[in-house]
Amino acid sequence: MSPELHIAIIDDDDSVRDGLVTYLRSDGRRIECYANGEAFLEAVKTNPPHIAFLDLKMPGISGLDVLRRLDAPSFPIIMISAHGDVAAAVQAIKLGAADFIEKPFEVEAVDAAIESARQPNGEQESAGLEAALAVLTDRERQVALALNEGLTNKEIARELDISPRTVEVHRARIFEKTGVRNIAGLVRLLSGKA
């Protein structure tokens, strides 16, 4: 029998916490909820979870500040946000988040994030930066590296003197060729954290 999975949900919105609890509740799972980052940081000292869902924007300590204070947590953290943007996703991954998903959640995204986060780093496929970039065209490499820096599609389009729609096409091809499903996965891959 596998050990109980301890899940923490940190979000200031009661309905988001309740919704995640409803979806995640099952045998073999223990779920604890926190309405703010301060309460979670206090609890994690003596009772770290196996995985945490952490809201990006909360009153008081933000989700990014929680990541900074945890400084390379020993458990995967999935950032969640209704206000996510490319720069925030990139920053969260670089601070140690395992994934970044946007509200409202798609069931598949939550399931994929949990599955990905539960894999020990050594078991995850990691082609490394050079191998990941090798499958891309020169333009796709430029777009991938710009995405990794947190630039938006419009900013990339301006920088590369192409249309935002062309950036979207390159972005889709980058995801397909590298096997990632979102910006968080691309940042992990390009930073060698896949």
Image: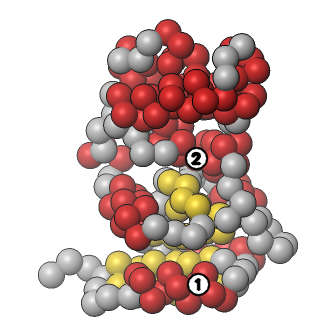
> Picture coordinates of residue 19 (x, y %)?
53, 85
What is the number of the mark on residue 7? none
Q: Nearer the viewer, mark 1 or mark 2?
A: 1
- The kind of residue on which mark 1 rests is Arg
Q: Is residue 139 above or below residue 92?
A: above
- Can residue 88 be seen in the rendering of this structure? yes
Q: Quadrant of residue 114?
A: bottom left
Left or right placement of residue 63 versus residue 48 in this view: right
167, 147: nearer the viewer: 167
Q: Residue at x 32, y 88 (%)?
A: 26
- Can residue 149 be seen in the rendering of this structure? no
Q: Is residue 41 above or below residue 69?
A: below
185, 10: nearer the viewer: 185
What SS does tag 1 mark? helix
> Picture coordinates of residue 151 (x, y %)?
70, 32
Q: Residue at x 80, y 68 (%)?
A: 61
From the image, tell me which residue sits under label 2. Answer: 93
From the image, tell me which residue sits under label 1. Answer: 17
What SS does tag 2 mark? helix
**In the current view of this chain or complex, which residue is farthest to the top?**
138
> Picture coordinates of residue 101 (x, y %)?
54, 59
Which of the two discs, 1 and 2, labels the residue nearer the N terminus?
Answer: 1
Label 1 to label 2: alpha-carbon separation: 22 Å
Left or right placement of residue 22 versus residue 112 in this view: right
